Amino acid sequence: MRSNPADYELVAPGSLQAVVSLLAERPGEWLPIAGGTDVMVQYAAGNLPARKLVSLWNLPELRSIETSESEVRVGAGCTYTDLREHLVVEREFPLLAKAARWTGGIANQNRGTLGGNIANASPAADSLPALLVYEAELVLVSARGERRVPYLDFHTGYRKTRLASDELIRAVCLARRFADYFSYARKVGARNAQAISKICIAGLGEMAGGRIEDVRIAVGSVAPTPLRLQQTERILQGKPVDAVLILKACEIARGEIRPIDDIRSTAAYRSAVVGNLVAEFLHGLRDSGRSA
Amino acid sequence: MSVPRKEGLDKVTGRAQYIDDMSLPGTLYGGTVRSSIPRGRIRKVTFLPGIPWDEFVVVTAKDIPGKNCVALIVDDQPCLADGWVNHPEEPVLLLAHADRRLVPQAVQSVKIEYDLLPPLFSIEESERQQEIIWGTDNIFKTYLVEKGNVDEVWAKADFIVEGEYRTGAQEQLYIETNGVMACFDRNRGITVWGSLQCPYYVHKALMKLCALPEDQVRVLQTETGGAFGGKEEYPSMIAGHAALLAMKSGRPVKIVYDRMEDMVATTKRHPSRTRHRTAVTREGKILGGEIEFVIEGGAYATLSSVVLSRGTIHAGGPYFWPSVRIRGKAVATNAPPHGAFRGFGAPQSLFAMERHMDRIAARLGMSAVEIRRRNFLKTGQTTTTAQTIAEPIDLDRLLQRALSLADYEAKKERFRSHNLSSSAKKGIGVAAFLHGAGFTGSGERYLASLVGVEGCADGRVRVLVSSTEFGQGTKTVLCQIAAETLGLSYQDVEIAQPDTEAVPNSGPTVASRTVMVVGKLVQAAALGLRYTLMGAGLLGERHSREEFCQACARYSAEHGRFKSWARYDPPSGIFWDEERYRGEAYAAYAWAVYVAEVTVDLTTYSVTVDDFVALQEVGRVLHPVLARGQITGGVAQGIGYALYEKVLWREGRMLNGQMTNYIMPTSADLPPIRVYFEELGNVHGAFGAKGIGELPIDGPAPAVVNAVGDALGTGFDSLPLLPEDIFQGMSSGAATGADSDAVRGLR
Amino acid sequence: MNTPRARCEISFTVNDEHRTVLAFPMERLLDVLRERLGLTGTKEGCGEGECGSCAVLMNGALVNSCLVPVLQAQEAKIVTIEGLGQQCRFPALQQCFLECGGAQCGICTPGMILAAWHLLNQNPQPDLEEIREALAGNLCRCTGYVQIWEAVAEAAVRGNRG
């Protein structure tokens, strides 16, 4: 443990209102900490420059999942366990439920939060590709009020987001329109559990009359941010799925991503595997169309 | 019999006391300032502002009362760098303070400036000798094993098969990091408690470092949370550091490494490069060959010569070599010194041997099973060091049984057709191997282990050994042995905490020697106790448990506590020629055949081990639950060595010194490993037992890599074998490793 | 140097006992348990939330205490290995670890037993896959896990019997 607790301040104002006021008072001075599964690791390694932290843990305003007819609103303070155990999330947003199950072991799932995962903005975060394909919208809150932004362009660069220095993620909204979609997700890590992803992929699709009616593919760990493969989606839209199309899609996908060599893996491996996973997704999508 | 672990209740209730669970009043916490460069001269040390330095105890090489070394074999390793550093993370300076949380910051606030010298980072760079970083030629040690007439076999060969095999470093990754506590008293000297395997190694090292006589150094082992060799020699270093701080401050000092420091600064398994060149007949018989086995030792000699020894002796595997030349070499590099890790050279050279057998099989168009069958050692034949195998081991039958347990033939068939149409390729692979128990050659004679058994006033008996418990069951089995010998129940026997003040030197807890060698001495010492009581007329030829306890209590009431000693007596007929490296290298070998079944997912190139059969002949199984636990644990580490555990280096420093990035298998990664035993007995071991601690880590890596080769039709010759390596190997379309084939004319 | 921050009073229940400590809010729950309350059964293996040796139950949920700032444990109900004996549903769990060889060096054992206990409370009759998943966040270097799974399975059998 390389940090000295005596050098750090942590406050728990106890309500969203109070936290937001604090952030407004001194924008950028207080680092929000929810379940701590990212922040506390940096802290223990002696790599946490922020000296003042404000706790979001267990704030009632952030830790609920509300369902209406048209959308599911997941509080940003919901843990992965909360996500896993919610019937509607499991049934209608299986990619998110799966990602929750894949993020660390049980102990870390009990503490890691969806909001934390998004705000931390690691390109390797497991839940982010799912949010991209579900086209989530984020509710951001500050003393200035609330705003709702599409998640699609929330990440602006490596570990950078559109979150203002006085803002928090309050909720993640998911439109309830994907229950009948074919869904596909895979995480490729160094081992089957407790692994940071080398590649993760989420795919959603719908076939109609033997053609792709709607398709969404997102990948993580292969670019500075999690990525929707929009070019790949464009060439797939409206087409029948055959071997030629699959090959073409894989090629475009490999061209869209920006994998690197890092401590976990290599660019060449990541590129090849993304191609393989896109192909696997498309095969599954095609088969779903046949059986429909 | 599977009696409950002696210290088990404490472990499952959280009461067991590991070093960091203990403290003394007034304890200071120590930290180590380490080199940030691989090689150079220390030019300047600056204590940066912002730390209350006047509150700190600071120790440098100048404070060392005795010799500045970590005494082991060659004594070349400084305890604290004095002017020069030879590897990243080399300890330079020690700090201590009462506030544990202040120490890491203080360590970061010592700035050292260096004049850099050109470093060496690989076996090849070391061999090129453009820089000499150790001795006169960068070579710690060489061995030459020769048998028969190798130079004549090439002309007679139908095939000459060559291969080069490499293994990477492996971190022991005991879940409890290294830790010690030391205190110093002018009258009593130094006392050290710690997480360690060999209290007497530490004792010897502290005597030299602190210039104290034998009775002024006391070392005690605390409950140790895993060791695997990683706490064989390293504790002498950390104990020396704590002792120096304790001497300077007059306060107790505790040093406990965090995970990153432990991973980057302490020992790892030696990386290796093995080259085989083998002359084979078309019938698959090995005529002879040359083996070059090289290990990378890091910056100081530590135990490299002994690791080299074991690896060299095991390099020929469980096969009959009519002629062979094995050259072993340990070379220096500017990395933190590598050291002991379960297997100790054998996993490296046996990986090469077993991969090479599959290569030979492929070249000859013969099955992996058949090539082994045709070359197995048989009773009456001699090993590479000309040791005659006297016991009735039937490796062919062992192989047969392993294959049958693994359903090998049927699976091979099934996989062949399955693989035609699936992107999840299945394969099955075999490894056959052996492991010599106890110290090599004259090692046990040199150790001259001493064991005591004590009779107590309450009629119970206490075992006195320096052998340590770190999960493998030392306490349990040694108590069982004493109980069995004396006709007592397990509860009647206890075992003293390893404390150099209270127990004799029964040798280090390494080399798979504890049950076999030390256990046999416990037997002898226990018998001695019985003879004492018989001699005093208190016990007859036959006695019940109650009678023994009564006799013991009576004798002890009259004479006080009494002890019986047994010292290692080298068995007759065991001769080892240290010069020519020939003869009986080990008193006993355990034998094994392992079979691994894998799936390689070609979408992600990941390998999953679906099934694993571990069959071994081990003399006698004294405690089925513990024995099985040793095998499953060793296999798990072997699978990690094969598929998951990679040390990433940059300029001699480990880059991935965190559990997040150094990958060991979880519950979700391993199959239910299946364990089976055979028992041939062993005259040299307690109740016929052979050593089994290291055996199970020798076989999994080649079995798994052979299975991957079977699945993909492409061989791989390096460890670890990551998905990235499989992808690379398949893209380039060729197996890695030197691979030439000189086909001679028909005979 | 930063100006020293203030300690604050943090109250919580540990093993059914109400405790109050004066601590820096960013002290790790792990360190408070071990160093302030003398509950050394909870271990540090990695400090990164990877090995699970520091696992405790916080309000019934398994968490890695090395990742919990003690302030976030305010008013929480904590159970450590020392307190497990008092839980009645699966008293056989520790006994099964003993009998089946689930503990070798013992350092991962407290966290492993807590993870197993957490599983059995939610799923009293887990199959092997469920046991493996539940324990995937607890690293063991000694056993290769096999005898741990057997201990948990045996505890499930005994717990459901009695």
Image (cartoon, coloured by chain):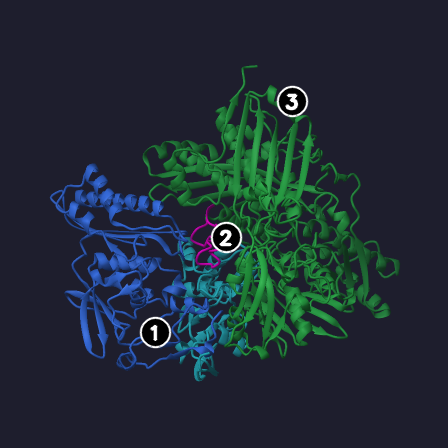
Mark earlier in primary sequence (2, 3): 3
Name the residue beneath numbered marker 2.
Answer: B651
> Percent from the top left, x then y, of residue A190?
41, 51
The image quarter containing residue B70 is bottom right
Amino acid type at circle 2 is Glu
Q: Which residues are magenta?
A: B643-670
C68 relative to A250 in the view: left or right:
right
Residue C6 drawn above or below residue B697 = below
Q: Nearer the viewer, mark 2 or mark 3?
A: 2
**SS under mark 2:** loop
Specify whether residue B649 is painted magenta.
yes
> Percent from the top left, x then y, of residue B633?
54, 51
Residue reaching furthest to the right: B536
Amino acid type at circle 1 is Leu
Q: Check whether the beta carbons of the residues at disc 1 and disc 2 lie within 8 A of each other.
A: no
Q: Indicate the colour of chain B.
A: green
Specify whether residue B341 is painted magenta.
no
Q: Check whether the beta carbons of the residues at disc 2 and disc 3 lie within 8 A of each other.
A: no
Q: Which chain is cyan?
A: C
Q: How many marks?
A: 3
Name the residue beneath numbered marker 1.
Answer: A31
**SS under mark 3:** helix
Q: Nearer the viewer, mark 1 or mark 2?
A: 2
The image quarter containing residue B455 is bottom right
Q: Which residue lies at the image location 24% right of the left edge and 42% below the top edge?
A: A251
The image quarter containing residue B179 is bottom right
Q: CA distance from mark 1 to mark 2?
A: 35 Å
> Percent from the top left, x then y, of residue B497?
69, 65
Chain hosting mark 1 = A
Chain hosting mark 2 = B
> Percent from the top left, x then y, of residue B343?
60, 47
Name the residue beneath numbered marker 3.
Answer: B152
